[in-house]
Image (spheres, rainbow, N blue to C red):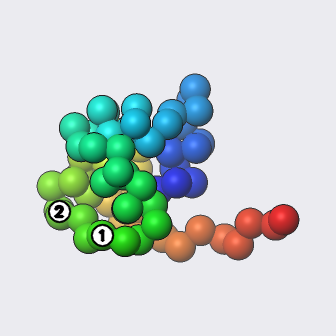
Amino acid sequence: MRRLRKAMPGKVSQEQLGELAECHRTYVSQLERAKTNISIDRLERFSVIFKVDIADLFQVPDEEAP
């Protein structure tokens, strides 16, 4: 999710994403760090926000070069 959030125009913060998704910024942080589970409803909400298929939210990003 972090990769998708950072790819959004305007450098969207966790707080801004939380507002768009109607959830708290700490929940966004926990999702980005894989510290909590997500419901189907939230998956759908984030897929609409990111304009991607739900399946795209499960893709493991490539290793980033230092």
- For residue 64, what is the image quadrant? bottom right
Which one is in front, 41 or 16? 16
- For residue 27, what is the image quadrant? bottom left
Residue that mark 2 sits on: 40
The numbered disc on residue 36 is 1
Q: Answer yes or no: do the residues labelled 1 and 2 have beta carbons within 8 Å?
A: no
Residue at 18%, 63% in the rendered image: 39
Which tag is nearer the camera, tag 1 or tag 2? 1
Which one is in front, 10 or 57? 10
Mark 1: secondary structure: loop
Q: Quadrant of the C terminus?
A: bottom right
Mark 2: secondary structure: helix
Spatial CA span between label 1 and label 2: 13 Å
Given the image, on which type of amino acid does mark 2 rest?
Answer: Ile
Question: How many numbered markers are drawn?
Answer: 2
Is residue 31 shown to the viewer in this render?
A: yes
Which one is in front, 65 or 23? 23
In the visual, does 39 lie left or right of 55? left
Residue at 17%, 62% in the rendered image: 40
Examine the rendered structure and indicate whether residue 34 appears above or below residue 6: below
Given the image, on which type of amino acid does mark 1 rest?
Answer: Thr
